[in-house]
Image (cartoon, helix red, strand yellow):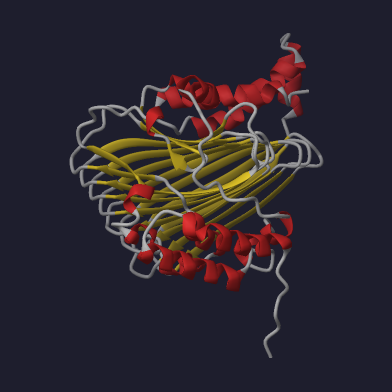
């Protein structure tokens, strides 16, 4: 006997929103067919909830109370000066730039000039001619069945298509900016397709920021698909900073060819509820992964990092380090799974997650996992949570350092270990500036 599950207000609202805006979304008949299939999948699945193991600690079905209207053909004016203000510390980066406002490309804010070997296009302009851009993900077609991916496919309005040619070494990072603006509460869905050619070398930075005075409530669904060619070296970062009431749902799919080296970093701050999903697959021997992240949580904010590293071929290496600082009633979640397939001999995989608890009411849930089906491997994982060391705090105070300053120094040192994994010095400085700003309002 089949039992029908009653849809929540948010689930019903999402289905109704698609009916209302589907005719205004970019793309031709083939894209519309993909969108219709995706919203059908979402209708069957509903929002993820705690009975789904991967969502055990982030019950989106209970947390998401309503569906905000999708941002379609948004024309909220944003100037270069306003964009710089929204970027904050990131404005100091010397980088090529492509910008999107409320999910739509805003060409007047771009700046990538004569970048030889770099091709950047807006997804919306390509959808009619290239509907495959909304095809299933790079890692596992079953991921397409996920409710969040299905919603992204159904509602996506735009995003960046980036191609770095074979053997090209980008002189500067490429900064892909998604800025929220305007006083209306809206939902935004964007997708990036990033392709790095064989032997290329590039730095890619995604920034999700908000214009001062913009509505505090928003729902963001962002997906990035990154393919790294043979022997290429890529540094890829995402910085998501908001006003504390946004729902930010993010997915990264990363595919590494033989001998590719990928360094990824995610920084999350000021999100009401954030879910950062990451899936990495190795497609050839000799691949190297270094994935890390830092998140700062206060009040009743909630940040969930869930990743899967899939070693399917021999001789690859992976490293993961994630650190969080939790204050107030904030909650941090880390779920990290390393899979070593039967043929993936000589795998070297290590993972660590750590949380610093600044409040007795904060919560940290960690679930590291190893699934090993090969015998010639070196793998390990660990997780810790702790308060500030009172002895070290006393030592600092005994040397004349005020308590608030000593606490800030200790927190900076803790989170700095993760931020130091970022190779670009300007980006490291920007992340530390964000951290100092956060601490200015949280140290006691």
For this orientation, the residue located farthest to the top is 400
Please, is residue 436 above or below residue 306 in the view? above
Identify the image quadrant of residue 406: top right
Q: Position of residue 201 (x, y in %)?
A: 26, 37
Q: Position of residue 269 (x, y in %)?
A: 61, 35
In this orientation, which residue lies closer to the viewer: 213 or 322?
A: 213
In this orientation, which residue lies closer to the viewer: 407 or 250?
A: 250
Q: Residue at x 66, y 63 (%)?
A: 11
Q: Quadrant of the C terminus?
A: top right
Q: Position of residue 16 (x, y in %)?
A: 62, 63
Q: Residue at x 54, y 21 (%)?
A: 85
Q: Quadrant of the N terminus?
A: bottom right
Q: Residue at x 57, y 59 (%)?
A: 20
For this orientation, the residue located farthest to the bottom is 1
In this orientation, which residue lies closer to the viewer: 426 or 6?
A: 6
For this orientation, the residue located farthest to the right is 360
Please, is residue 135 above or below residue 2 in the view? above
Q: Is residue 151 left or right of residue 271?
A: left
Q: Position of residue 95 (x, y in %)?
A: 36, 26
Whether residue 411 is visible: yes
In this orientation, which residue lies closer to the viewer: 142 or 176?
A: 176
Please, is residue 257 above or below residue 178 in the view? below
């Amino acid at each position: 006997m089949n039992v029908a599950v009653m849809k929540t207000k948010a689930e019903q609202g999402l289905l109704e929103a698609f009916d209302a805006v589907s005719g205004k979304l970019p793309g031709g008949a083939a894209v519309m067919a993909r969108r219709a299939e995706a919203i059908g999948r979402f209708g069957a699945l509903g929002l993820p909830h705690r009975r789904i193991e991967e969502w055990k600690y982030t019950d989106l079905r209970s947390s998401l109370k309503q569906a905000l209207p999708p941002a379609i053909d948004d024309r909220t004016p944003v100037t270069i000066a306003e964009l710089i203000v929204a970027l904050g510390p990131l404005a100091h980066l010397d980088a090529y730039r492509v910008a999107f406002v409320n999910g739509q490309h805003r060409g007047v804010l771009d700046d990538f000039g004569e970048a030889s070997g770099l091709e950047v296009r807006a997804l919306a302009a390509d959808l009619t001619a290239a509907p495959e851009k909304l095809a299933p993900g790079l890692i596992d077609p079953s991921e397409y069945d996920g409710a969040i991916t299905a919603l992204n496919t159904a509602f996506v309005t735009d995003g960046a298509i980036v191609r770095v040619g074979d053997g090209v070494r980008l002189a500067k990072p490429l900064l892909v900016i998604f800025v929220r603006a305007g006083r209306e509460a809206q939902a935004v869905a964007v997708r990036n397709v990033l392709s790095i050619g064989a032997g290329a070398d590039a730095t890619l930075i995604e920034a999700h920021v908000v214009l001062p005075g913009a509505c505090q409530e928003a729902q963001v669904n962002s997906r990035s698909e990154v393919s790294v060619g043979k022997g290429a070296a890529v540094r890829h970062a995402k910085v998501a900073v908001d006003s504390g009431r946004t729902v930010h749902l993010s997915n990264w799919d990363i595919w590494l060819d033989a001998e590719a080296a990928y360094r990824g970093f995610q920084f999350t701050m000021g999100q009401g509820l954030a879910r950062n999903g990451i899936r990495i697959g190795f497609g050839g021997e000799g691949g190297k992964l270094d994935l890390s992240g830092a998140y700062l949580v206060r009040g009743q904010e909630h940040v969930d990092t869930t990743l899967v590293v899939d070693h399917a071929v021999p001789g690859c290496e992976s490293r993961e380090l994630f650190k969080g600082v939790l204050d107030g009633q904030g909650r941090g979640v880390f779920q990290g799974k390393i899979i070593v397939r039967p043929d993936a001999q000589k795998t070297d995989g290590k993972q660590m997650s750590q949380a610093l608890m600044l409040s007795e009411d904060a919560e940290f849930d960690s679930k590291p996992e190893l699934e090993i089906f090969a015998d010639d491997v070196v793998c390990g994982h660990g997780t810790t949570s702790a308060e500030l060391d009172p002895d070290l705090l006393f030592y600092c105070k005994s040397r004349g350092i005020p308590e608030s300053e000593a606490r800030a120094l200790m927190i900076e040192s803790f989170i700095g270990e993760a931020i130091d994994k970022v190779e670009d010095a300007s980006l490291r400085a920007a992340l530390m500036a964000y951290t100092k700003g956060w601490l200015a309002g949280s140290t006691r």
